[in-house]
Image (tube, rainbow, N blue to C red):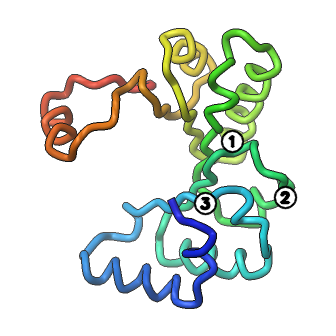
Amino acid sequence: NTSALEFRAKDFINNIRTTLSDTGMVPRFLELELTESVLMRDATSTDTVLHALADMGIKLAVDDFGTGYSSLSYLRRFPVDTLKIDQSFVKHINSNTDDATIVSAVINMGKSLKKRVIAEGVETPDQYAFLIAQQCDEGQGYFFGRPMTAADLGSLLRSGRFRQLN
């Protein structure tokens, strides 16, 4: 997650380049998450920074999608790869038809725009089933696992016993 303060810093791009160089990380394996409010604060400078990041091969995600006060025009203007549906919509998809409609619409819109769509806050089997039926790309939340240490995550990944959305 990239904060507004970090994103607006004059040396942000250089810090990213230095970090990639120091770690040897391949840029396409880095995905930066930005909220809609960060994206829309100063669209002109945002556009420049996002295109510089994308040109480096870095992936870009819109976090908490649907909660900001922005225009959908940034989905075509900015080089965004991923939309992360805010958990406030996912929470009630099985009990609130408006939330279910919004989540379905975001998934369909994301797919139509060739964006990866991730649902945040997946906690129940019913939410999971809804997202599978809507062909959501990925999910995050307690349904899949609780926070854990890096060592525990390594053990989990090696075991192959983890839930996937698809």
Residue drawn 68% across the image and 33% down it: 107
Give the mark toward the camera: 2 or 3.
Answer: 3
Residue 131: x and y in percent read 58, 21
Label of residue 73 in the image:
2
Residue at 61% across / 33% down in the picture?
87
Residue drawn at (53%, 34%) of the image:
137
Q: Quadrant of residue 162?
A: top left
Whole-percent x, y for residue 144 in the image: 38, 25
- Using the image, tell me which numbered label, if any, was put on residue 92: none
Which mark's residue is nearer the viewer, 1 or 3? 3
User: Badge 2 local density, few (<14 within 10 Å), some, or many (20+)?
Assistant: few
Which residue is tagged 1? 110
Q: Nearer the viewer, residue 67 or 111?
A: 67
Callout 3 secondary element: strand
Rounded to the nearest whole Å, what is the CA distance between mark 1 and mark 2? Answer: 13 Å
Q: CA distance from mark 1 to mark 3?
A: 16 Å
Q: Is residue 83 left or right of residue 149?
A: right
Distance of label 2 from label 3 (alpha carbons): 16 Å
**Residue located at (63% from left, 69% from top):** 4
Three-letter amino acid code at the position of disc 1: Gly
Judging by the rendered image, the residue that carries numbered circle 3 is 34
In the picture, the quarter occupied by the C terminus is top left
Q: Is residue 13 above or below residue 67?
A: below
The disc labelled 3 sits on which kind of residue? Leu
Disc on the earlier residue, 1 or 2: 2
Q: Earlier in the sequence, mark 2 or mark 3?
A: 3
